[in-house]
Amino acid sequence: MSDALMTRMQDKFVTVDGLKLRYIEEGEGPAVILLHGASLGSSADVFIRNIGPLARAGFRAIAFDQPGFGLSDVPTDLSPAYRRDSIPKFMDALGLKQAALVGHSQAGNPAVQLALAEPSRYSHIVVLGTGSLLPPLDGEADGNEGAVQQRLERRMAQAEPTIDDTRKLLEANLFHHELITPDELMLRHARSIGQNFLAFVARNEAAEASPPKQPKTPLWQRLTELKMPLLMIFGREDRAKAAERATLLKEKLPQLDVHIVNGCKHLVPWDAADDFIRLAVPFLKA
């Protein structure tokens, strides 16, 4: 059994909007809420490698299964806006007046939206591998990364994945395939089937029926409006030319704290667990 799973935190549950939401946590101190992405199999467990080190650094590290993911209940509203708005409600349920937000993949976007709307509620923002917060390259349409992800998810939604399908999806998003231990694979697969697969299909169908409206000003252009510190980490080998686009972001907005990590694809909390702690702990303490 992997060390990460041997030290798994106890599952806890809290009720938000009548839904039972599962979360895991460790440590005491300023709260850091870790937000998973929206791909099939996503859950709080993506941060198993990160919670312990954050706790040992003096933080209360909390990751929760957003509505419709992991062991949390499935809402009737499957929109990204509902998941975004569940974050401050989850904080309220835990009695947290303020927290830092760490958003992986699609969760980086709502983390920034919340911080722009209510800056006093969020002390720091950390973005991990969120392509929608990067500018397009010359000659490419804005939102290209989202289109790539949508095509991938449409293919995935044809049938409930087998254990081999789950492995292939992890391999596509991980640079370090040795991290896919039997225990990690079984856990990810358990979060990809049954209720989670049905919710995944329903989310895709809802998104196709009512595509989200694109803001007049792309969100990456508003990053300098944030009132709190922002740290952004991307994998050099991530999809949709993320490294090139992150480099372009640094050129366009040099005041931003943007890092590109070698040997890292899209699952930044796995591939770059050590780099995340090395960068995030002093950032969160500053």
Image: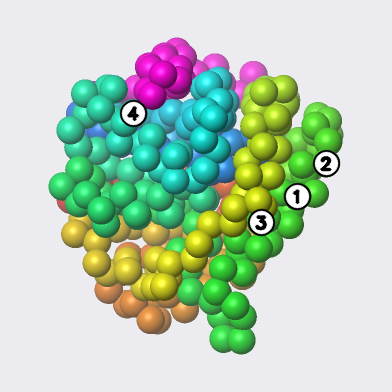
Q: Residues within 10 Å of mark 2 (few under 14, many from 20)?
A: few
29 in magenta:
no
> Separation of disc 4 and disc 3 at Cα?
27 Å
Q: Residue 63 carries which label?
A: none
* Residue at image mark 4: 90
Q: How crowded is mark 1: few (under 14 residues within 10 Å), some or many (20 or more)?
A: few
* Residue at image mark 3: 149
Q: Tell me whether the residue at label 3 lies in contact with that at label 2, contact meaning CB atoms closer than 8 angstroms.
A: no
Residue at 34% across, 77% down: 253
Q: What element carries label 1?
A: helix
Name the N-terminal-most of marks 4 and 3.
4
> Separation of disc 2 and disc 4 at Cα?
32 Å
Instruction: Name the amino acid, label 1.
Output: Arg
Read off the magenta span.
1-28
Give the percent coordinates (x, y) of residue 280.
33, 48
* Placement of the N terminus among the 4 image quadrants: top right
Q: Tell me whether the residue at label 1 lies in contact with that at label 2, contact meaning CB atoms closer than 8 angstroms.
A: yes
The answer, for residue 115, to whether it is visible in the render is: yes
> Separation of disc 3 and disc 1 at Cα?
9 Å
Name the N-terminal-most of marks 2 and 4.
4
Name the N-terminal-most of marks 3 and 1.
3
* Residue at image mark 2: 158
Residue at 49% across, 66% down: 214
